[in-house]
Image (tube, rainbow, N blue to C red):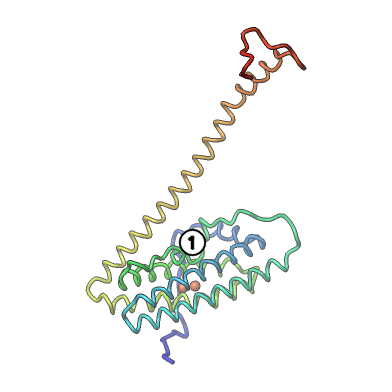
Amino acid sequence: MTQYPRKKNPARIRPSRFDRLLRPIHSWVWDDPRRRARKLLRFAETEADGGRDLCRAAELTSDALLRRLYLRHASDEQRHADLFRKRGRALIRSLPRGAETSFEANWFAPGERGLDDVRVDGENDASLLAFLHLSEKAAAGRFTLYQEVLGEDPETQAVFRTILRDEVFHMTYTHQQLTRVAPRKWSADLWKGRMGRLWKAYLRVAAAVAGLLGTLMLLLQYALFLPPFAWLAKRKARREPEGWFPPRRGTPIRSQY
Ligand SMILES: [Fe+2]
Ligand SMILES: [Fe+2]
């Protein structure tokens, strides 16, 4: 079987400045064990989904080395999904039955985002590698931060530590392969990938803001328009006679209206 390069001491990964700035929020997000468990299960779905997309990428590429690397990458992501799922379930089992925490703060702590919306069909090798490299780099930074804030839960911390080693490998091999398949324009491909990620981030924020504004508008409508209508309906009801009463003059007898 082909052996792939894997660094024994992976490069020190630093979370992005934005994530470092939000560190107190990340600590708060991961502090609640119930939310932690739900997030791990959600991460498991993302990783498994990414693994399936990478299998598809392996089918589509005509480059034999890339095919082997994508398959290796896919099996890593599947293993990550199993690790997250196992730990998430163990956490849930260890908790007393109680109220569910529905807020997962996926905005702040999205896991291996990028793998969830990778589109392998219609991409060429270079653009897919650029996309994967940026996603893996962002994931490695985030997992480093999650690992740091999980000091209270050494078992979950160990899961992130194990997965992080693979993410660093994914980040490195995708960059190496990008420079191999696109030696002259790999930098442009990376910039294009960055712009695509920025656009998706903008769409995510815009959708969230639109959802918030929609909720506010509905609340305002309920608060401003409903009370006068309720008051008018009650006033009208008070004027209606109670019980059975003969039809008012002018009421057509062939119809109830
Ligand atoms: Fe992963
Ligand atoms: Fe990965």
- In the rendered image, residue 56, in percent from the top left (x then y), is placed at 41, 73
Q: Nearer the viewer, residue 202 or 49?
A: 49
The answer to whether 168 is drawn above or below residue 255 in the figure is: below
- In the rendered image, residue 53, in percent from the top left (x then y), is placed at 44, 71
Label 1's element? helix
Q: How many numbered tags mark residues here? A: 1
Q: Given the image, on which type of amino acid does mark 1 rest?
A: Arg
Q: Nearer the viewer, residue 51 or 246?
A: 246
The residue at the far left in this view is: 184
* 100 with respect to 190 (left or right): right
The residue at the far top in this view is: 249
Say which residue label 1 marks. Answer: 20
Q: Nearer the viewer, residue 112 or 51?
A: 51
- In the rendered image, residue 212, in percent from the top left (x then y), is placed at 51, 43
Pick the quarter of the image with the N terminus: bottom left
Residue at the (46%, 75%) spot, across then down:
167
Residue at the (63%, 18%) spot, across then down:
232
Q: Dot 1: within a 10 Å radius of its alpha carbon, few (fewer than 14), some, or many (20 or more) residues?
A: some
Write down the quadrant of residue 218 in the picture. top right
Pick the quarter of the image with the C terminus: top right
The residue at the far front in this view is: 254
Q: Nearer the viewer, residue 125 or 130?
A: 125
* 142 with respect to 235 (left or right): left
Write down the quadrant of residue 4 in the picture. bottom left
Residue at the (65%, 20%) spot, across then down:
233
